Image: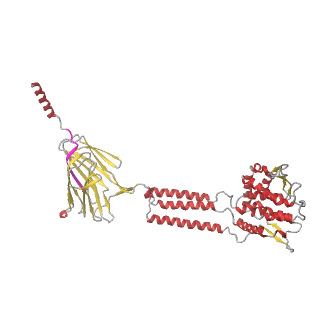
Amino acid sequence: MTAVGLLSLVLLVFAGLTPAQADDRANRLELEISLTVEGQVTVSQTLDFGGAAPETVTVEIAAELNLGDSVRSEYTISDVTAQAGGQPLAVASETKAGYQILRLTTGQTTEPITLRYVVRGATSAEADGSVRFSWDALQGLSVGVGEVSGRLVLPAVAVDYICDSGQPGAITTCATYTGGTHGSSTMVFTDTERQPGDILTVGAVFPAGAVQVTEQLSQGWSLSRALSWGWPQITVAAGVVVIGGLALFGVSRRRRAGLAPATAQPVASFETDPNGHIAFVVSDHLRPGLVGTLADGSVDPADVLASLLDLAMRGHLRITELPRESAYAVPDWLLTRHQGGDALAEYESQLLDAVAPVDAATRVSDLVGVVAASIGQMQQSLYKQVIKDGWFSRLPGTRSKWSPLVWVGLGLSVLVTAGLMLWTSWGLIGLALVAVSLLSLLLVQDQPVQTPAGAAVAAGLGALSAELHSVPTDRLRPGHELADASAVLPYAVVLGGWERWLAAMVAVEPVPGADATGLDWYNAPEDWHLSDLPYSLKSFITVVIGALSSRV
């Protein structure tokens, strides 16, 4: 029992000699905040732990405040010092996630610890012109405090004072605060126990001009800001669209108005002799293939078919109808080359070489494979011919000469829009510019390839088409009916009315059922008669167009 007693006494003695452990809660926090006329704030925080302080005390000071709509108010923290008992303390500072973090190495001092720093950017202008000062004098402290007291020294008497405290998101007014009494410009405040991380905000509102505004605003990017729908942005964007649209409409209308010819250029006509007979006369050797291309702006199967018929009637090609293998067999024809009496255009030579090579013949049933390799070249030659004749300004399907410029304009509009959206709130104007650029691109691509000269010829084609549908076919020159009707047929194939001209060819047969004579471009089996010509040519036209439709 004596030994146990002695051991207990020794343990008590050693326990009494053990140093006191640092507490994570200060007894008191004394705050001193002063504001100058220039808007500079000096903050002094004095922590009294009533014993040994923790090894490290941390204070996290907000370096920026989010005001909404990607707008931030930034604060400049400077002149940071710390001391205890008149001796300086080491302060480590780092900036992280919008906070300036201060770490004080206390050495577990038992003296009160004072932290001082200077703030700039805490005064801002209100909508009514007044100046507001606000600062979280207590924020981000790593230890709690038993009670808070302090004072706010201001350069002038304020019209209102602010003192709020509490946990973030649950702020209430301080326990007590008074300011402006008896003309004093100092506010004195106290508060109850505060936990680590709590906030105590002090501030004041001054008349306009009493204190300098030091607010430092920075604008971050956001889609809502970049595409702001304010009335100035909407007004300017609408103006860009309206003015740009009207300008493009005017240019397009002027361009198309220039295609309306003052007078139509005759392509072909029916001339009447003194006896009232008519003859078909073509102006400037305008061949059916060219006429058809100009009529609709493209080379189609009807244009190729009309060229084949025209080559046959001019003596360069002979169409021979072959006997049917059975009554239900699909009709077929043989295309053979002959020596015509006039010169051929490039596209005509290419077509003739494809369908009727020298010393060879081609069946219409084999036409698809024959023209597959050359029809594209022949189409391009036809387009080049109408360009050479001054009817088209460019190849159909190709870009206008203005297209590169419009593409450059579109690219610049996109760059301007990107710049406006990145650095301003006027992105809506950039989108309006892009819309106008896209519209101009569509209009340029839609610009007709036809020239004014081509429009004049096209107007003449309209007149010719009306005549092909209305001219009496019974007034052809006596003795030339078959030749004259044959000359009309290729043009009627591309402009319409070819059935009535086939009927006119049959009507010249002097005796029903007589053999066909004088029709050297079309041969047929021995039992064939001229009265069969409409059926034969209708079948020929149908089969050839069907074959060409898969390639043209």
Residue 189 placement: quadrant = bottom left
**Extreme-bottom residue of the structure:** 274
Of residues 378 and 533, the one drawn nearer to the viewer in this rendering: 533
The x, y position of residue 448, in whole percent, is 66, 63
Of residues 324 and 455, the one drawn nearer to the viewer in this rendering: 324
> Can the viewer see residue 301?
yes
| Residue drawn 59% across the image and 67% down it | 249
> Can the viewer see residue 390?
no
Residue 495 placement: quadrant = bottom right
The structure's colour scheme is: secondary structure
Residue 26 part of the magenta segment = yes
Left or right: where does residue 256 sit relative to residue 46?
Answer: right
The x, y position of residue 304, in whole percent, is 76, 57
Left or right: where does residue 181 sit relative to residue 318?
Answer: left
The x, y position of residue 70, in whole percent, is 39, 55
For the C terminus, give its image quadrant: bottom right
Left or right: where does residue 534 sit relative to residue 108?
Answer: right
| Residue drawn 33% across the image and 64% down it | 127
The x, y position of residue 25, in whole percent, is 21, 44
Q: Is residue 60 above or below residue 516?
A: above
Q: What range is drawn magenta here?
A: 21-34
Dominant SS of magenta comes to strand
**Extreme-front residue of the structure:** 327
